[in-house]
Amino acid sequence: MKKMACFWKSLLPVIFLFILQVVATIPVMIIFILKERSTTGDDITAILVSLSDITSNQQYLQTVNIVYGILALLIFGIWYQRVFVRPFRNRPKKQPTGYSFHTIVSMIFLGIGLQYVTTLLTDLIGRLHPEWITKYNAAMETQGYSDLSVMLIVYSVIMAPIIEELIFRGLIFRYARHAMPFWFANIWQALLFGFVHLNLVQSIYAFVMGLFLGWVCRRGHGIRYSIPVHIVFNIIGCFFAGLISISLMFSYAGFAVFGVVLTIFALWLFYTDFQTTK
């Protein structure tokens, strides 16, 4: 009975995620509508037309992300702290909890390696289903990734990795671990991580990435190590994705092997730093 309760609790963060997105959207939409109304007057038709434009406006989408990000950091941060950090604060530590040079290198290497792995996976999807890639690229352009703004950088590089680790590896994974063995719990949180992206290409590579981050979370006994890996991954994706693509164009086989080997090496480095959770 307790295991079933923990399983259902593992779904709650996803439900709250979607609720918070709606809550963040409403005030931002009202502000943007009022702004449009000041220029279009009280003409209902004009307001409805402007509403359609607003929902595809990059500034609007990015403002919603920031408002959602602030709410999510507060709510999920407090949730994780109260349920999975504070009750165990006084327990004796079984391992180092800091960031050694060894660990920092492994996190950076893993972030870079995962960029290669997910790029290779995206290329494979593109060969099998080019229409999926077309939709994915259009979605990325709509969100503003072709011309990065300060708001998008803040959200993508700082807020999103922390929020997603709190939700998926912090709350969902920890609840699921009380209900099922590690690998089932890891697959479960990675599936939900892929699902919330609501884009087939992103969902696939987010699932794969989630599996790696879940392993890091288990090995490091928390999200303090999966967050930096996720941040490095997003930094590479935002600022250096072109270099990844160029390197693969220069020598696809060579850099594909390099990316996979770098990922394996980073996992081994991280593995040697920590004791296995039983």
Image (cartoon, rainbow, N blue to C red):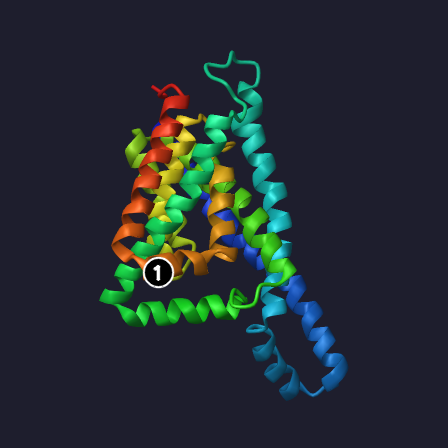
Residue at (44, 27) in percent of width and height: 220
Q: How many marks?
A: 1
Pinpoint residue 157: horizontal percent, then vertical percent.
56, 50
In-image side of 51 versus 121 (left or right): right
Provide the residue designation for mark 1: 201
Q: Quadrant of residue 184?
A: top left
Q: Identify whether 61 is placed above or below 68.
A: below
Quadrant in which the C terminus is drawn:
top left
Q: Which one is in front, 4 or 99? A: 99
In-image side of 166 versus 33 (left or right): left
Residue at (34, 29) in percent of width and height: 268
Pinpoint residue 173: horizontal percent, then vertical percent.
41, 35
Residue at (50, 54) in percent of width and height: 18
Q: Residue furthest front?
A: 250
Q: Quadrant of residue 27?
A: bottom right
Quadrant in which the N terminus is drawn:
top left
Residue 10 visible in the shown view: no
The kind of secondary structure element at disc 1 is: helix
Residue at (55, 21) in percent of width and height: 87
Q: Residue furthest left?
A: 128
Residue 153 visible in the shown view: yes
Pinpoint residue 154: horizontal percent, then vertical percent.
62, 53
Label 1 is placed on what type of residue? Val
Pinpoint residue 266: horizontal percent, then vertical percent.
38, 35
Q: Residue furthest top?
A: 92
In-image side of 226 versus 206 (left or right): right
Q: Residues within 10 Å of mark 1 (few under 14, many from 20)?
A: many
